């Protein structure tokens, strides 16, 4: 496998890779679902933590259709996602949450490598956060849900006519690994030691 600097294109996950936002996102689910029984919310939190690369839309749907065994409308899902996004924008527009290790690599190399963000977080919300913390300069596109990550990756490859051999996805979840595998591009794990069993793993960008 190539060294990271040898790739022409890097697709970055956001939560847990560029920003230490997971504790706040965890709290967001708890707040949005606070009217529901705690054991059901706990079950959703377990699913959420095990599926970091899935969108909130998929997780809210899982909460109703699997945990509660109820049907749920698209409108209900959209309303919950909107409430969740409102909470996220209150807390995540904060430069102190940026992961210095990865951001330093991005700032150093963004002119030499094409960079995109592909995230399970809401796309509009993600762009607002990146603008607030001055990250938007470094990326050709910043894309998120409700489009699934595997489709976001495919869309970028097609739109920019990238060669698959030139592209690597960096993420912190098995879902990120799956999105890379489905699109036949390389994957590098980061900030989740469990991924070392699946793919090459970056312990620190400063060591590369």
Image (spheres, rainbow, N blue to C red):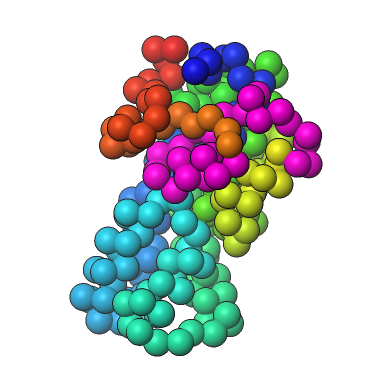
Provide the residue span drawn in magenta. 158-183
Q: Quadrant of residue 203?
A: top left
User: In this orientation, does residue 79 appear?
Assistant: no
For residue 188, above or below residue 16: above
Percent of width and height locating residue 113: 66, 21
- Taking the view exactly as shown, the residue that stands out farthest to the left is 39
For residue 196, above or below residue 148: above
Percent of width and height locating residue 35: 33, 82
For residue 22, above or below residue 36: above
Closer to us: 23 or 17: 17
Q: Residue at x 48, y 84 (%)?
A: 72
Closer to us: 112 or 137: 112
Q: Is 182 in the magenta?
A: yes
Q: Does residue 47 appear left or right of residue 185 in this picture? A: left
Q: Quadrant of residue 159?
A: top right
Percent of width and height locating residue 61: 46, 74
User: In this orientation, does residue 2 appear?
Assistant: yes
Q: Residue at x 67, y 45 (%)?
A: 154
Count of numbered tags? 0
């Amino acid at each position: 496998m190539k060294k990271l600097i040898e790739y022409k294109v890097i697709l970055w996950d956001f939560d847990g890779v560029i920003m230490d936002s997971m504790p706040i996102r965890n709290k967001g689910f708890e707040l949005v679902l606070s009217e529901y029984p705690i054991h059901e919310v706990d079950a959703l939190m377990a699913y959420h933590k095990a599926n970091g690369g899935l969108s909130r839309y998929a997780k809210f749907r899982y909460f109703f259709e699997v945990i509660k065994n109820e049907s749920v409308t698209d409108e209900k899902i959209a309303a919950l996602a909107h409430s969740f996004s409102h909470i996220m924008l209150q807390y995540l527009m904060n430069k102190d949450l940026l992961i210095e290790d990865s951001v330093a690599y991005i700032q150093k190399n963004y002119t030499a490598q094409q960079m995109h963000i592909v995230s399970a977080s809401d796309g509009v919300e993600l762009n607002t956060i990146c603008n607030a913390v001055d990250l938007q300069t470094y990326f050709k596109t910043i894309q998120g849900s409700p489009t699934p990550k595997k489709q976001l990756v495919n869309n970028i490859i097609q739109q920019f006519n990238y060669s698959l051999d030139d592209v690597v996805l960096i993420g912190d979840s098995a879902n990120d690994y799956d999105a890379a595998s489905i699109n036949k591009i390389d994957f590098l794990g980061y900030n989740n030691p469990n991924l070392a069993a699946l793919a090459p793993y970056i312990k620190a960008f400063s060591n590369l």
